Amino acid sequence: MKYLLLPLLFLTTKSFAARVDTILVHSDAMNKDIKCVVIQPEHAATLNPAPTPGSEKATHFPVVYLLHGHGGNYAQWPATAPQLKKEADDLGILFICPDGGFDSWYFDSPIDPTVRYETFVTKELIQYIDTHYPTIPDRAHRAITGLSMGGHGALYLAIRHKDLFGAAGATSGGVDFRPFPNNWGIKKDLGTITDHKNNWDKNTVYTLADSLHNGDLKIIFDCGTSDFFITVNRNLHQKLLENKIDHDYTERPGGHNGAYWRNSIDYQVLFFWKYFLSGH
């Protein structure tokens, strides 16, 4: 695997000392380089070479992976929620914002072998970040969330890889895309819902939630009451209640837009920070 550090994408100001880098991580699974934004606390340093034990550079941090929405890219979260830089410093958290493609939905396509974003995030990106940044490399200090398509991706990956993630969330998440069979390029990667219903059932969060046992994950998700995804989020909330799966669910006034996500992410970051402090 090859890696390249790119120049800063977002300049920090005197108010925020957090370092914001854009990096390229090569995906062997998809044979391409993928951009990611890394927001790290002021005193974090890359592990090249490895820091001397006991030195300031030996400080390690929990990690929150932030997945963007359909049509977005690696820069969506830093642009939507610039307060993440201050939260990285204040709470001591690394934020990782990978590019998930225009319409990947973060799964490995069963019909297109070039779409393997589940493999990229879980087998390639995490390994790279844990090797090159001062992380605490265990599930108790690793969380994932996202907006819209990324909300689906975050819960999807966390449920399927509970050994990697201890906490997961979604904001305005497309947690069940089956009611939208002709939208957002999904049938390109799963086939049509008429001909490939099993592909759709196996790759949506709502169905996967049946595999959860209480305590498997710390879960938080929310949705605006004017969002077109409000019904599927309410359905997921009801399923988790019926299955007695502890979770935090919130509805707030708002739609499917940056203003809603900019507000929502602060609550989710606090939720993850409390989880990291618990040591579970």
Image (cartoon, grey):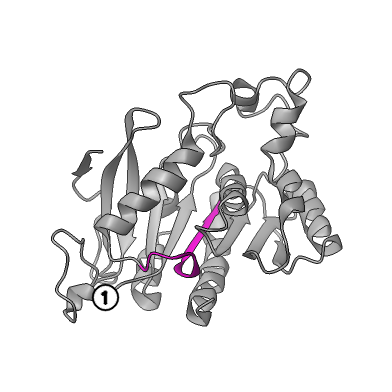
Q: Residue at x 49, y 64 (%)?
A: 139
The quarter of the image holding the N terminus is top left
Residue 3 location, quadrant:
top left
- Residue 138 in magenta stretch: yes
Q: Nearer the viewer, residue 171 or 50?
A: 50
- Residue 132 in magenta stretch: no
Residue 78 in picture, x, y percent from top left: 39, 54
193 in relation to 263, above or below: above
Q: Residue at x 67, y 28 (%)?
A: 183
Residue 180 location, quadrant:
top right
Q: Which residue is mark 1?
A: 59
Q: Nearer the viewer, residue 122 or 153?
A: 122
Type of amino acid under label 1? Thr
Please give the count of numbered marks on the rendered protein. Answer: 1
- Is residue 199 visible in the rendered image? The answer is yes
Q: Secondary structure at mark 1?
A: loop
Residue 73 in picture, x, y percent from top left: 43, 40
The quarter of the image holding the C terminus is bottom right
Q: Residue at x 31, y 50 (%)?
A: 128
111 in relation to 141, above or below: above
Q: What is the magenta range?
A: 136-146
Q: Nearer the viewer, residue 106 or 139?
A: 139
